[in-house]
Image (tube, helix red, strand yellow):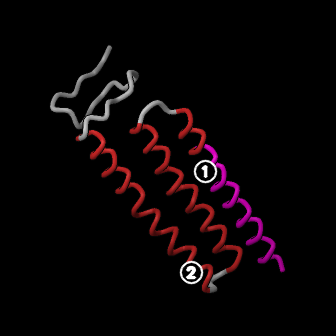
Amino acid sequence: MIVDTILEILSNIFLVIGLFFVFLGMLGLVRLPDVYNRLHTTTKIGTLGAFGVMISILLKVGFSPIGVKAITVGLFLLLTAPIAAHMIGRAAHRHGVGLCDESVVDEYGKVCTIKK
């Protein structure tokens, strides 16, 4: 009885944490200036937000088939979202998509320039 209550509370906490990161990621997607900053934000949505929701589902339903699928999807997102964002960012840079004016370092450029 007490274990069920604790699991319910933990599930709700992970759900709120996941939804909080999704909200911050969506806010960043609207507010950030260029494709590189937006990629960073969408990666956070995919990793922290979705993974928090998937852990919440696992805690809510246990190791049933739905729980195992949820944790599998969460791990898949955790492993693939950063790699995909890196590849998209690299392709955007190679195709000449510029940085915003506030950016100070271009790690992919031939010479890293730091604005003062």
Q: Earlier in the sequence, mark 1 or mark 2?
A: 1
Q: Is residue 113 left or right of residue 104?
A: left
In the rendered image, the vertical position of residue 91 relative to residue 101, given as above or below:
below
Please give the label number shown on residue 68: 2
Residue at image mark 1:
22
In the rendered image, the vertical position of residue 86 relative to residue 13, given as above or below:
above
83 part of magenta stretch: no
User: In the current view of this chain or complex, which residue is farthest to the front?
Assistant: 95
What residue span does the magenta drawing correspond to?
1-24
Looking at the rendered structure, the kind of residue marked 2 is Val
Q: Nearer the viewer, mark 1 or mark 2?
A: 1
Which corner quadrant of the image does residue 105 belong to?
Answer: top left
Please name whichever residue, 6 or 58, is drawn nearer the observer in this view of the structure.
58
Looking at the rendered structure, the kind of residue marked 1 is Val
Q: Give the Cα distance between marks 1 and 2.
A: 22 Å
Q: Residue at 54%, 55% (x, y): give it.
A: 48
21 part of magenta stretch: yes
Quick one: quadrant of the N terminus? Answer: bottom right
Residue at disc 1, secondary structure: helix
Q: Residue at 63%, 74% (x, y): give it.
A: 58
Residue at disc 2, secondary structure: helix
User: In the current view of this chain or complex, which residue is farthest to the top?
Assistant: 116
The location of residue 37, given as percent across then percent down, is 43, 37
